Image (cartoon, rainbow, N blue to C red):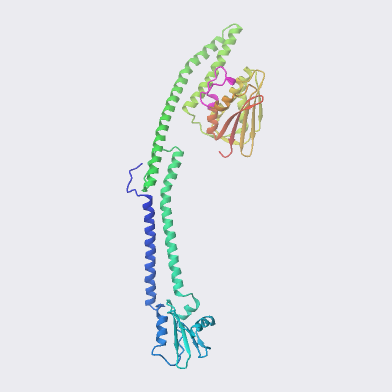
Amino acid sequence: MEKRKRSVSLSFVLLRFACIMLGLMLFCALLWLAIMQLLQTTGFIYHGSLPNRQAEAMLLDHPETFTTPGEDFLSDYALFAADGSLLETNTDSKEAGRLSVFLTKDSDDPHIIRYIYADQSTILIHWVYQRDFTDPQLRKYLPPFEVLWWITLFLAFIFVLLLSVLLLRRSLTSKLKLFHDISNKITSQELDFAIFPAGIREFDDALAAMDEMRRALYDSLTEQWRTQQQREAEISALAHDLKTPLTLIGGNAELLLCENLPENQNHMLHTILENTTRAHRYLSGLLDASTGNKEPKIPFDLSALLPDLVRSMEPFAGMKHISLHMDNHLTGFYPLQKDHFSRALSNIVQNALEHTPPGKQVSLIGRTSDTGWELLIFDEGMGFSPAALRHATERLWRDDPARQADGHNGIGLWFAAEVVHSHGGTLTLENRPQGGMVKILLNKSF
């Protein structure tokens, strides 16, 4: 991982987030107060103490009679006669009734003012320290200014909180995305990359551990690749070296067949040629497996797949006195490496023929469904042993006494499984009551 630069702890990140959020809230509060002061200075709203000053000015110099105040009088008042009857008010009856309680007793509430005129009438004034609109129409149709103002401050705090949380989420998400990207690259074995620090100590510790894992996996896969390359090179060299003596053996056997030899010797020569041909097939499969096949995938008519396979395998089946049965219902086209795929199927059929007694049958069945294609190849031999069901598709595995045969090289089924997998399909081994079966599934979504 790249060298850390100014790595901080997660707790510091959260503390910084809290400080930024509180700082923004303080800024909103100061801005809120400044705007309120500006509105008050410009006369859009009045000062909260104005109702009290109006009440005091109304009773200044102890007037002997009541004078009705103007519409701009902001406090609630109620004028009562000496007998307690309501003479005048600028509020509703409920508030006037509440004020009438203070006709005969003093109030401890500093917001209640009582004054008795010369004619024994009494005025009760209820004032509230509250800023409000100077325009009567705004006071009539809108909630009190301070209520609206506190709501705006609350909404501003909520906005700051949400904004801060979103910014924190964005910051942490960008850091956590590093883990997601690294996991995807490691999963896909793209290991030649650098891991950059996230800048948060706890995250960087986890990234450092992932970097160690990446390097260990990279070294392991590199060594595995080198070992595999070396092994495949050795296999390829061995296969090439074996081709020359096999060609010489086959050529000499063919020359001897031209001689007038006894029947038993001709039979031995045919056996030599048959096994030489089989060895050539093994070597071809071995070379394909070791060097890789670069044949492009071209859409192929699957209806011709099994007939071509049967035609190519009939001579070998005839020599074994085994019949080939075909039930072909394959339709449609599929992208195939034709030669590669045909060799894989030939390996399967040849394996089935080798383990089927003379006079028996090997069946090839092709089916088409909505989701894909199914190919079944089964014989009437002894079937797969439990070990073979698990390991027969592994390279060079041949410890299978139930299907052991001379010349069995442990490559045929492995090569077939690799080819089917490279074509987006699956190959599975099963047993039937009469013998073994190889099932190939090709998916239409490939």
Name the foreground residue: 122 vs 366: 122
Q: Quick check: 443 left or right of 73?
A: right
Name the foreground residue: 2 vs 427: 2
- Name which residue lies at 38% across and 50% down: 10
Which quarter of the rendering shows the N terminus?
Answer: top left
Up/down of 362 relative to 163, above or below: above
State the image coordinates of residue 277 (x, y, percent, origin top left).
Answer: 55, 18
Q: Does 419 lie within the magenta span? A: no
- Name which residue lies at 59% across and 21% down: 403
Among the 4 quarters of the image, the one containing residue 30: bottom left
- Name which residue lies at 46% across and 71% down: 148
Name the foreground residue: 174 vs 338: 174
Q: Quick check: 3 left or right of 164?
A: left
State the image coordinates of residue 412 (x, y, percent, origin top left).
Answer: 54, 24
Up/down of 77 relative to 10, above or below: below
Name the foreground residue: 90 vs 294: 90
Q: Which residues are magenta?
A: 394-414
State the image coordinates of residue 258 (x, y, percent, origin top left).
Answer: 56, 10
State the image coordinates of residue 389 (x, y, percent, origin top left).
Answer: 58, 27
